[in-house]
Image (cartoon, rainbow, N blue to C red):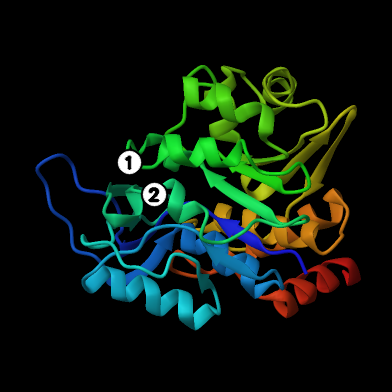
């Protein structure tokens, strides 16, 4: 059975719900607040809940937040690949969701921002596995170069999934230039794709991404409630979304990415994997919190219900 090796960052989210964000220097009261495992945990939980075994190949800290991160991963059945704790604690993200279901983040990086070649070698990547790389990782000086060097040594039978995230804004940085030729699966939202390529719409972004990535790369670009677009070689398809009443968009893209990779690992076509991912993201936005991806049974139920209508 293939597995996912997730090389991103598990952090702790302080999740707060407000009617609207305060003006600079202002204050508002939140309707709720809680500490939840987030960051890379969201993708891993989504994949694990949908039948793909996951190994966290990242650092975790010593302290209150490190304990919360490990407890959350253990509860999901996610294997912690690097067993030794770092001396500093795991980082924190303040995640604020307003009444429109849009979310805003302020993050502080802790132990998860460092990684060594020895850490990465602690769990072997085997043929058929998926190695998940986050664009956030390329921004951490104590992690980026060892990670890219390791990815470039992986056998071709190991598939590399890249999620640029919101902070990678150009394909021209040296580490991105080194990594791009090794990417097998690209997963992003439309805003990220437009920002990186300078395109004005998704079709143009996909055209431009072809110029940066290997010819046979599988690209999936999420388009919110509209679903997503998948593109590989000369084939491009729109995969419709599912109509739901959204309350919190936090973690929906992560749910999509994790379920999409789980589908591919189980032998589904890109279209079928994307349809399941769309269903998972749709269900995720109906729930508060970051790691709200449904499991396999709920995804099956929504797809079946949609077909029967």
Decide if residue 248 is in sight here.
no
Is 104 located above or below residue 215 in the figure? below
Q: Mark 2 or mark 1: name the one nearer the start of the chain.
A: 2
- Quadrant location of the N terminus in the rendered image: bottom right
| Residue 37: percent from left, percent from top | 39, 68
Question: Which residue is labeled 2 in the image?
Answer: 115
Decide if residue 78 is on the left or right side of residue 239: left
Please tell me which residue is depicted at 52% across the width and 36% down the height of the picture: 148
| Residue 143: percent from left, percent from top | 39, 42
Decide if residue 200 is on the left or right side of residue 34: right
Q: Looking at the rendered structure, which numbered label has been put on residue 142?
A: 1
| Residue 8: percent from left, percent from top | 47, 51
Of residues 279 and 74, the one nearer the viewer is 74
Is 84 located above or below residue 23 in the figure? below
Q: Give the crowd class for mark 1: few <14, some 14-19, many >=20 residues within 10 Å.
A: some
Is 286 located above or below residue 121 in the figure? below
Q: Looking at the rendered structure, which numbered label has been put on residue 67?
A: none
Of residues 117 and 273, the one nearer the viewer is 117
Q: Secondary structure at mark 2?
A: loop
Q: Secondary structure at mark 1?
A: loop
Decide if residue 82 is on the left or right side of residue 273: left
Please tell me which residue is depicted at 30% across the width and 75% down the height of the picture: 67
Q: Are marks 2 and 1 in contact (CB under 8 Å)?
A: yes
Give the residue furthest to the left: 25
Decide if residue 174 is in sight here.
yes
Please tell me which residue is depicted at 40% across the width and 48% down the height of the picture: 116
- Quadrant location of the C terminus in the rendered image: bottom right
| Residue 89: percent from left, percent from top | 23, 63
């Amino acid at each position: 059975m293939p597995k996912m090796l997730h090389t991103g960052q598990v952090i702790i989210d302080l999740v707060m719900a407000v009617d609207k964000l305060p003006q600079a220097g202002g204050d508002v009261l939140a309707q709720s607040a809680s500490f939840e495992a987030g960051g890379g945990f969201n993708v891993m939980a989504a994949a694990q809940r949908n039948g793909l075994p996951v190994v966290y190949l990242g650092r975790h800290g010593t302290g209150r937040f490190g304990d919360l991160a490990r407890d959350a991963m253990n509860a999901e059945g996610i294997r912690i690949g690097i067993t030794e704790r770092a001396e500093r604690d795991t980082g924190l993200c303040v995640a604020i969701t307003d009444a429109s279901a849009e979310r805003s983040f302020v993050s502080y990086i802790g132990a998860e921002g460092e990684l060594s070649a020895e850490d990465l070698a602690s769990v072997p990547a085997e043929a058929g596995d998926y190695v998940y790389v986050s664009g956030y990782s390329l921004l951490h000086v104590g992690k980026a170069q060892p990670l890219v060097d390791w990815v470039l040594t992986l056998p071709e039978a190991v598939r590399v999934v890249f999620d640029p995230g919101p902070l990678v804004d150009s394909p021209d940085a040296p580490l991105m230039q080194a990594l791009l030729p090794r990417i097998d699966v690209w997963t992003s939202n439309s805003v990220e794709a437009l920002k990186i390529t300078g395109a004005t719409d998704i079709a143009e972004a996909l055209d431009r991404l072809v110029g940066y990535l290997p010819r046979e790369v599988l690209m999936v670009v999420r388009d919110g409630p509209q679903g997503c677009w998948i593109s590989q070689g000369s084939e491009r398809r729109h995969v419709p979304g599912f109509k739901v009443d959204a309350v919190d968009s936090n973690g929906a893209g992560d749910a999509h990415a994790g379920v999409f990779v789980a589908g591919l690992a189980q032998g589904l076509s890109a279209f079928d994997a994307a349809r399941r991912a769309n269903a998972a993201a749709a269900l995720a936005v109906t729930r508060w919190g970051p790691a709200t991806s449904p499991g396999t049974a709920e995804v099956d139920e929504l797809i079946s219900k949609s077909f029967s209508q």
